[in-house]
């Protein structure tokens, strides 16, 4: 496999970098490429650790819990904790979404379009913003249900 094929897309890396920097800051091509290589290597490192764990447990699928475990095992406890919180909120939102789909089948197509739109907007956010947005979405989704029962 060519090296370029295993790297994260440089446009995505640059966009993430720009979100953190002041608007007037510039990023050199060399800076983006270095960050691209580092981020790709980090992801590969963590994924390989999680994959080894799965292999030892005779499992073929790496899941979010395996990634959290790998981050912690590799000494990235802060990342592991943050991702574990995000994973928990994501799973709560998914459970809530599934329950809503079962109780409101006639809104399924509209809901899917809204989720797709929200999903594309999420791509441009910083991970901490996604976590906050996920928490707010779950709270907002619960609020109407509470008001309707009154």
Image: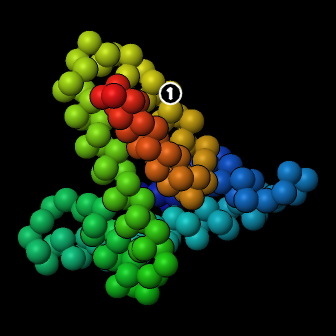
Residue occupying the point 46% across, 69% down: 82
Residue occupying the point 42% across, 59% down: 86
Residue 23 visible here: yes
Rendering colour mode:
rainbow
> Vertical placement of 140 versus 106: above or below?
below
| Mark 1 crowdedness (10 Å alpha carbons): few <14, some 14-19, many ≥20 | few
Residue occupying the point 50% across, 27% down: 117
> Vertical placement of 17 versus 121: above or below?
below
Residue 63 x, y percent position in the rendering: 26, 60
**Residue 84 in the figure: left or right of residue 4:** left
Residue 101 x, y percent position in the rendering: 24, 27
According to the image, label 1 marks what residue?
117
- Total numbered labels: 1
Residue 119 x, y percent position in the rendering: 48, 36
The quarter of the image holding the N terminus is: bottom left
Residue extending farthest left? 58
Tell me which corner region of the image, top left, top right, bottom left or bottom right, holds residue 110. top left
């Amino acid at each position: 496999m060519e090296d370029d094929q295993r790297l994260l897309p440089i446009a995505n890396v640059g966009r993430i970098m720009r979100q953190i920097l002041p608007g007037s800051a510039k990023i050199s091509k060399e800076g983006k490429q270095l960050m691209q290589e580092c981020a790709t290597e980090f992801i590969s490192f963590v994924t390989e650790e999680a994959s080894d764990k799965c292999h030892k447990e005779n499992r073929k699928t790496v899941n979010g819990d395996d990634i959290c475990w790998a981050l912690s095992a590799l000494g990235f406890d802060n990342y592991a904790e943050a991702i574990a919180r995000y994973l928990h909120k994501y799973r709560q939102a998914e459970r809530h979404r599934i329950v809503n789909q079962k109780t409101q089948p006639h809104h399924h197509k509209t809901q899917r379009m809204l989720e797709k739109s929200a999903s594309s907007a999420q791509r441009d956010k910083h991970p901490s913003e996604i976590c906050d947005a996920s928490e707010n979405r779950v709270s907002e989704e619960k609020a109407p249900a509470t008001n309707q029962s009154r």
